[in-house]
Image (cartoon, rainbow, N blue to C red):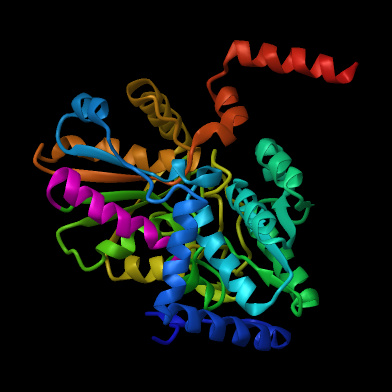
């Protein structure tokens, strides 16, 4: 099976000439392993012994009773090693790096989960590791930065532009250009030049394969709807792919509505009015940009959803109307997070909570015979500083003050 470069009108590989041979090498290596059943079995063995695959599918009985309507199931990627779906892709790319004989990996990260996953993979496989992270995200996700560094990775804050994910991606490509002989760029989402969208989606497809088997076993049929948050698109494509041919299962991607779609402070590419087709960071998709093609600043309470672009695969599915897109605002996210914690004792990451918002809006209109799956892409302990601040928790504030005093002595 050859690698696709375009998905309808989207995708491509718009790269500098100096990187052509590197991408050619990567594409060839990926095509070889994708057509090798033994590689996928090696990957499954690694994920079942080193990570926590298959991750559970949890029937959220209390939330189901609270809303009425459809049975709510949660795909628990938060229980994957490192706390998110990100390790699925990274460990797959790590096996690929070993076959290619590279000795160093670099990565970008926003919420920090991809950075932690890459640092974990590098430690496991004995690779040097450098992580680029927007300075704004370093501040928001300090616990993840701490763990990356403790696992031996070098974390470099990016101070250009908006100091968030898009700027970290730019710095990663600059590094790769100067170190491509020894270095592999472990891109974390299903964006960028080919073969990255297809490669990342392939490794993440393990989510949907598991979810289909689990929902058939637990519910006795396929779900009416699947909800997943959408930043670049890796977790949503991970669960959507298995169900693309299942016409009775509706697929819903939920973007970051930030302060509202009319505020200019959001990261909604496919359900807002601020995005248009463009080419940047090596591929063509819908980008948040002005009429001159300059990228706009983004905003989200979640560090992992404030990306300017979206996977070309999702742009194609949006254009074909196979995936419906919605947006969740910051305030709605906090409300959904609060309810999920109190009803189920489950703490979604702020990114994942966007999917919960839209599911909560819609499940009551479905039948009790129906089932929906919410893909919980990660857990919320990484967001404790942001969550505590948003809830204006007085005991947390006091804890921070007292701990600051102890460290300043």
- Residue at figure coordinates x 58%, y 44% from the top left: 303
- Locate residue 403 relative to residue 213 in the image: left or right: right
Q: Which residues are magenta?
A: 203-221
Is 211 a magenta residue? yes
Q: Position of residue 260 (x, y in %)?
A: 46, 41
Asked if one can make out residue 220 in the rendered structure from this viewpoint, the answer is yes
Quarter the N terminus occupies: bottom left
Asked if one can make out residue 280 in the rendered structure from this viewpoint, the answer is no
| Residue 311 vertical position relative to residue 300 in the rendered view, above or below | below
- Residue at figure coordinates x 42%, y 46% from the top left: 77
Give the dominant element type of the magenta stretch: helix, strand or loop: helix
State the image quarter where residue 218 is shown.
Answer: top left
- Residue at figure coordinates x 22%, y 50% from the top left: 225
Q: Position of residue 391 (x, y in %)?
A: 53, 21
Q: Position of residue 241 (x, y in %)?
A: 32, 64
Quarter the C terminus occupies: top right
State the image quarter where residue 359 is shown.
Answer: top left
Is 185 a magenta residue? no
- Locate residue 216 relative to residue 280 in the image: left or right: left
Q: Nearer the viewer, residue 95 or 1?
A: 95
- Locate residue 409 relative to residue 28 in the image: left or right: right
- Residue at figure coordinates x 34%, y 43% from the top left: 56
């Amino acid at each position: 099976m050859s690698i696709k470069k375009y998905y309808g009108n989207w995708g491509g590989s718009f790269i500098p000439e100096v990187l052509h041979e590197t991408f050619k090498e990567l594409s060839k290596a990926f095509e070889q392993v994708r057509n090798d059943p033994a590689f996928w079995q090696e990957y499954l063995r690694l994920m079942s012994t080193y990570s926590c695959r298959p991750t559970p599918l949890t029937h959220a009985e209390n939330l189901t009773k609270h809303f009425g309507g459809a049975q709510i199931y949660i795909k628990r990627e938060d229980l994957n090693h490192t706390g998110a779906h990100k390790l699925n892709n990274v460990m797959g790319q790590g096996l690929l790096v070993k076959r290619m004989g590279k000795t160093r990996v670099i990565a970008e990260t926003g919420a920090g989960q991809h950075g932690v996953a890459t640092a974990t993979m590098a430690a496991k496989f004995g690779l040097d590791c450098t992580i680029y992270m927007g300075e704004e995200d370093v501040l928001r996700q300090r616990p993840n930065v701490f763990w990356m560094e403790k696992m031996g990775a070098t974390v470099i804050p990016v101070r250009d532009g908006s100091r968030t994910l898009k700027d970290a991606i730019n710095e990663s490509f600059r590094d790769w250009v100067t170190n491509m002989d020894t270095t592999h760029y472990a891109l974390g989402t299903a964006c960028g030049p080919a073969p990255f969208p297809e490669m990342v989606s392939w490794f993440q497809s393990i989510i949907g394969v598991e979810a289909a088997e689990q929902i058939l076993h637990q519910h006795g049929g396929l779900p009416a709807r699947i909800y997943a948050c959408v930043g670049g698109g890796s977790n949503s494509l991970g669960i959507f792919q298995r169900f693309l041919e299942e016409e009775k299962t509706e697929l819903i991607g939920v973007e970051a509505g930030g302060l509202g779609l009319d505020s200019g402070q959001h990261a909604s590419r496919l359900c807002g009015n601020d995005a248009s087709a463009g080419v940047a960071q090596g591929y063509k998709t819908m980008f948040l940009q002005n009429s001159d093609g300059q990228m706009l600043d983004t905003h989200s309470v979640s560090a992992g959803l404030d990306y300017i672009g979206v996977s070309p695969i999702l742009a194609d599915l949006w254009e074909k109307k196979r995936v419906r897109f919605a947006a969740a605002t910051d305030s709605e996210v906090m409300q959904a997070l609060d309810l999920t914690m109190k009803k189920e004792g489950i703490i979604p990451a702020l990114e994942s909570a966007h999917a919960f918002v839209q599911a909560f809006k819609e499940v009551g209109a479905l039948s009790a015979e129906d089932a929906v799956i919410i893909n919980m892409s990660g857990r919320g302990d990484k967001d404790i500083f942001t969550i505590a601040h948003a809830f204006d928790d007085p005991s947390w504030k006091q804890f921070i003050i007292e701990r600051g005093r102890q460290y300043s002595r």
